[in-house]
Structure formats: structure tokens, C-alpha cells
């Protein structure tokens, strides 16, 4: 079952009807369990193909119980290493010899996201930070939670429990949920394929155009379009699953908050794939930085230790995205992005002091180029998401050094005014929404707008008769 | 240790970490009210608290704190268990 798709929507409606029949906790847990297992079964019914994932899940549950009852440091670390090793093995990371891999195909949809949830449970169980001991039904329902199985969000267990017990479904919430589902479908089914086509077109033109200047313009566009494509595709998926989960009385956390207006790479990761970056900050960056400060307690060492911790944490984010060596480059780019950003902040604070540095950061031109630099670095890092090494080699050959430099400059200087405009528009829109201005935010206009969007989506998908659109983060 | 003493010592730590002698630890004080309180400064604060009170925080405790009041209560509960 693809997400978003009409089949997924129908499945969500059916589960919502069943779950809302009774408010009894046992009923709801039972419906969730059947729905979660049915969602997995929609991908495969072959028992053999479910055994590896099932064993991984079982190992996770047994591990939680072991560390809960036997808080032993050596056992905890052994379990974590085994779990990460099993994850890499099942995900077929290329550093594992092919002969050591399982010789048959098996189900592993959402395994990355499930793994984040399991590791979080094991660490919190070991540190006695879980709100309550987790039973097998809650464990399955939490790790395999069907709206967030395929590509997250990575909701932490305490938040999941809170949400399960306290989410109200009134008329206003239901209306907002419907609007989000429509927007989600529109983004994934209509906008995202158009952007992908535009990206492929600019890639082709960047290689085949006659003049170097033309190739550079298309290369800059090619670089700029891809992050927008990922954003529209992934945030569309998020809109859909958040909307559907709301009808199941589950409030999923947001994953995006206007990422392209970020004025630094650290800020970007506070706005982009937020549940992943929060997980990384909680379970890698914070313990690593605190551990390093205990190991090297001199206050003068703290800034450099923080920079190192940032690099390691976000290098991991990059490497997590894929199984091949290419993703090491993404890791280095992400790691450099946040660590250089932090180093720059530290140096600027030392040079100018807090007040003057803050005043510099608030200058319009400074803000515009901070946004553009952040976006450009992210766009360059994203190269390894979509391009193979031969493609990169060909692009580099066709552009040459002058063409590549020109493309980068065009990206940077084009992004600055474009993102300043985007920021201004989003600020205006937020102000208008807060002031509840009668025209654009009136219920009548909203009904017309979302009905038009829904009609467009249904008509376009019916005319195109194409398979359900692909959500890029499903692959991770 | 009385909770007032925890707040007094937290005031010293906050002033040292954020280099601001006007800061006073109070329950409602949160990151968005103190210039420079980002995740980097937050962890320097946690480290200073761990050293000053001889306590340690779990990963989720470090990131789950909403304000100084929650931090003081957490320190108090850890000290009372010692």
C-alpha cells in the first residue's frame, strides 16, 4: 500500500470508523494492532519475507526487557551494537560482503524509522526514562504505527502515549485534517511530479546546451529545483499522514517548519525533517557533547568539542540516508554544514560580542545571503541523493571549472532575492492568519479553495491513470 | 538541599554560562527569554549543572526540559534520591 494513495486513504477511513466506535482503551488498542499488522500484510503475505523484519522487532522488544530489568552498561552497549549491526545487515549496506547477506528478498518497508523508535525505547528503558513499562501490544502498535510506518515522522514514545490518550477530534480538528490530506495529495500527486520533470529537463539541458553560460544557468536551476522537489514530496506525505492520523485520534509531530527561510545550516536542521534531527540531537549530539566535556573539562575546550559533536551527529544523518559510499559524502557535507556554521557563530561572537553580532544578523542583506548560502549548501549536498558518480563526472566535464563556478554563483545570487521574497510572503501570510482577516481565511473561501484542489487532484490522477506517486523518503 | 538553594546555585551557573550578571534563576525562565540559549549553550548549562550538583541526566531529560523550573525540580528529585 503506497502512501499517499486512494487505497491508503480508504484504509485510513475504515480504521477511523472502527477506532471511533468505542473510547475504551482495549478496543482502540485492538483496532490499532489489527490495522498495523494489516498495513504490513498489504506489502507482502509471504511468511518467509516477513521473518527478518519480525525477528528484528522481536530482538528489539527482548532488548528493552533485558535493559529494563538488568541495567548493565556492558549488556546495554552490546545490545546497541548488535541492533545497529543487524540493521546494516538487513538494509544490505555495501560494506557487508554479499555472501553474508540473506539470499532472498524480504519486507523492510519503514525499517529505518522503526529502528529509530526501537533504539529510543532501549536507551530510555536503560536510563529509566520511559513513562511506563511497555507491553508487547503497545510495542507493536508504537513501532509499526501504520500512518508513520513508511517514512515517519519519528514520534517519541512519551509523546505517542500522550497523544493516544488526549487527542480530541472535534469539527474544527476534522476540517483541518481534511484540508491537510487534500494539500498532501496535491503536493505529492501534482506538484512533486512536475518538479521532478523540471529537474530532469534542467539536468538534460545542463549537459547538452551549446553555450557554457546556458549550461551554467540550467545547472543552477537543476541544483535549486531538487531540494524544493524533496520538500514538496516529503511534506506532502507528512500532510497526508498527519491528517489521516488525526481521524484516528493520534496527533503526529510536524516534520517541517518553513525550512528554506533558515539563516544557517543549524537552523535548517531545526526546520527540516525535525523529528529526525530532534532524535539525533537527543540521542547522539547531546550525550556525545556532554561526554566530551566530562572527558576534557577545560572550559576553553568546550566550543571545539561542540563543533566536533555537531560534525559527528550530522555526519550520521547523511550516512543514514543510504547504503552506499556516496552517502558518506552527504554525511561530510551535512557535518561540515553544521560544524562550520557553529564555528562561525563562535568566532563572530568573540569578535563582535552578542549585541553587535545580533545587530549584524538582523541586517536585510545579511539575512538574504545567509538564507541563500544555507539553501545553496543544502542543494549541493543533495547532489549525491539523485546523481550517480558517472552523472556527476559528466556534469563536471560539460560545465568545466568556469561553468561550475558560474552555476554556483547563479544559485547563490538567485536564491538570495527568491528566498527573501518567500520569507516576506510567509510572514505576511502568518500575520494575516493571526489577524483572522475575513476574506482569504473565511470558511467559505477555504471550502472553495480546498474543493478546487481536491477536484484538480482527482481529475489529474484519473486522466493520467498513473500509479500512486513515489515518496522519496520511503527509500531511506 | 532546599529548593531555594538549588535556585541560588542555578543563578550562578546561568550567569557564568550566558555571561550575563543580570540573570536570575526563576521557574518560568525559558530558552527563548535568554539571548544565546541555543542547543549548544543548553548542553554547556547541563554540563555545569551536572558538575555543580554531582548529578547526571538521561538523554531524554536533557532535551525535554522546558524551563528553569523543570530543571530545578529535576535536580531536587535527583538530590533527594542520593
Image (cartoon, rainbow, N blue to C red):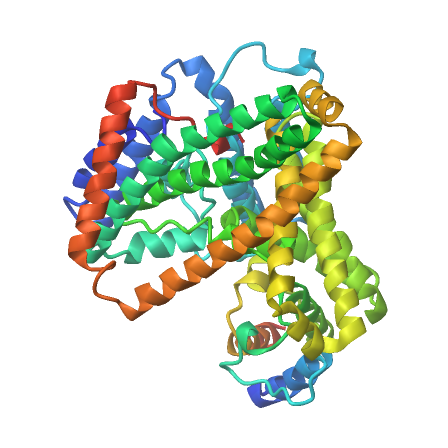
Residue A470 in the image, given as x and y percentages of width and height: 42, 26
Q: Is residue A165 visible?
A: yes
Which is nearer the eye, A79 or A429? A429
Instruction: Tell me what residue is drawn at x 31 percent, y 63 percent.
Output: A433
Q: Quadrant of residue A162?
A: bottom left
Left or right position of A315 against B78: right
Q: Quadrant of residue A226?
A: top right
Which is nearer the eye, A193 or A60? A193
Left or right position of A26 against A40: left
The N terminus of chain A is located in which quarter?
top left
Residue B74 in the image, given as x and y percentages of width and height: 55, 72
The C terminus of chain A is located in which quarter?
top right
Q: Is residue A321 visible?
A: no
- A396 relative to A185, above or below: above
Residue A4 in the image, given as x and y percentages of width and height: 34, 32
Instruction: Tell me what residue is drawn at x 33 percent, y 19 percent.
Output: A466
- A423 relative to A225, above or below: below
Amino acid at each position: 500500500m503506497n502512501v499517499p494513495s486512494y487505497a491508503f486513504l480508504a484504509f485510513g477511513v475504515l480504521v477511523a470508523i472502527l477506532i471511533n466506535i468505542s473510547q475504551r482503551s482495549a478496543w482502540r488498542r485492538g483496532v490499532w494492532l489489527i490495522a498495523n499488522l494489516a498495513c504490513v500484510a498489504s506489502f507482502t503475505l509471504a511468511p518467509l519475507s516477513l521473518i527478518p523484519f519480525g525477528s528484528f522487532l522481536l530482538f528489539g522488544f527482548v532488548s528493552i526487557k533485558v535493559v529494563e530489568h538488568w541495567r548493565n552498561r556492558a549488556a546495554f552497549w552490546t545490545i546497541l551494537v548488535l541492533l545497529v549491526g543487524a540493521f546494516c545487515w538487513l538494509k544490505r549496506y555495501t560494506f557487508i560482503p554479499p555472501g553474508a547477506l540473506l539470499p532472498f528478498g524480504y519486507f523492510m518497508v519503514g525499517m529505518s524509522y522503526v529502528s529509530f523508535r526501537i533504539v529510543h525505547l532501549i536507551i530510555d528503558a536503560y536510563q529509566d526514562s520511559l513513562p511506563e513499562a511497555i507491553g508487547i501490544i503497545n510495542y507493536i502498535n508504537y513501532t509499526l504505527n501504520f500512518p508513520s510506518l513508511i517514512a515517519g515522522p519519528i514520534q517519541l514514545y512519551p509523546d505517542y502515549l500522550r497523544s493516544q490518550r488526549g487527542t480530541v477530534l472535534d469539527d474544527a480538528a476534522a476540517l483541518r485534517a481534511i484540508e491537510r490530506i487534500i494539500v498532501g495529495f496535491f503536493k505529492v500527486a501534482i506538484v512533486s511530479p512536475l518538479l521532478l520533470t523540471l529537474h530532469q529537463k534542467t539536468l538534460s539541458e545542463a549537459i547538452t546546451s551549446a553555450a557554457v553560460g546556458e549550461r551554467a544557468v540550467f545547472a543552477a536551476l537543476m541544483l535549486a529545483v531538487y531540494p524544493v522537489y524533496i520538500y514538496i514530496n516529503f511534506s506532502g506525505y507528512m500532510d497526508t499522514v498527519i491528517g489521516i492520523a488525526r481521524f484516528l485520534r493520534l496527533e503526529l509531530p510536524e516534520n517541517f517548519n518553513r525550512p528554506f527561510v533558515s539563516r544557517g545550516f543549524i537552523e535548517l536542521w531545526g526546520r527540516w525533517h525535525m523529528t529526525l534531527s530532534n532524535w539525533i540531537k537527543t540521542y547522539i549530539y547531546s550525550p556525545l557533547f556532554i561526554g566530551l566535556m566530562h572527558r576534557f573539562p577545560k572550559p576553553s575546550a568546550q566550543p571545539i568539542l561542540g563543533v566536533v559533536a555537531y560534525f559527528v551527529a550530522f555526519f550520521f544523518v547523511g550516512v543514514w540516508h543510504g547504503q552506499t559510499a556516496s552517502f558518506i559524502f552527504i554525511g561530510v557535507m551535512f557535518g561540515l554544514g553544521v560544524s562550520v556554521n557553529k564555528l562561525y557563530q563562535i568566532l563572530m561572537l568573540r569578535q563582535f560580542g552578542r549585541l553587535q553580532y545580533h545587530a549584524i544578523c538582523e541586517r536585510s542583506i545579511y539575512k538574504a545571503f545567509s538564507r541563500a548560502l544555507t539553501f545553496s549548501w543544502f542543494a549541493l549536498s543533495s547532489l549525491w541523493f539523485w546523481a550517480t558518480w558517472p552523472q556527476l563526472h559528466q556534469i563536471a566535464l560539460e560545465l568545466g571549472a568556469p561553468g561550475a563556478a558560474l552555476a554556483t554563483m547563479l544559485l547563490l545570487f538567485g536564491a538570495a532575492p527568491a528566498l527573501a521574497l518567500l520569507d516576506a510572503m510567509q510572514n505576511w501570510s502568518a500575520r494575516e492568519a493571526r489577524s483572522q482577516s475575513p476574506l482569504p481565511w473565511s470558511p467559505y473561501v477555504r471550502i472553495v479553495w480546498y474543493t478546487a484542489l481536491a477536484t484538480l487532484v482527482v481529475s489529474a490522477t484519473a486522466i493520467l491513470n498513473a500509479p500512486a506517486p513515489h515518496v522519496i523518503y520511503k527509500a531511506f | 538541599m532546599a529548593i531555594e538553594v538549588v535556585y541560588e546555585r542555578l543563578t550562578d551557573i546561568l550567569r557564568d554560562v550566558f555571561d550575563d550578571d543580570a540573570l536570575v534563576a526563576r521557574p518560568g525562565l525559558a530558552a527563548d527569554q535568554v539571548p544565546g540559549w541555543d542547543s549548544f549553550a543548553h548542553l554547556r548549562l547541563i554540563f555545569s549543572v551536572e558538575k555543580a550538583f554531582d548529578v547526571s541526566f538521561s538523554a531524554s531529560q536533557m532535551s525535554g526540559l522546558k524551563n528553569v523550573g523543570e530543571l530545578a525540580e529535576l535536580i531536587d528529585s535527583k538530590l533527594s534520591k542520593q
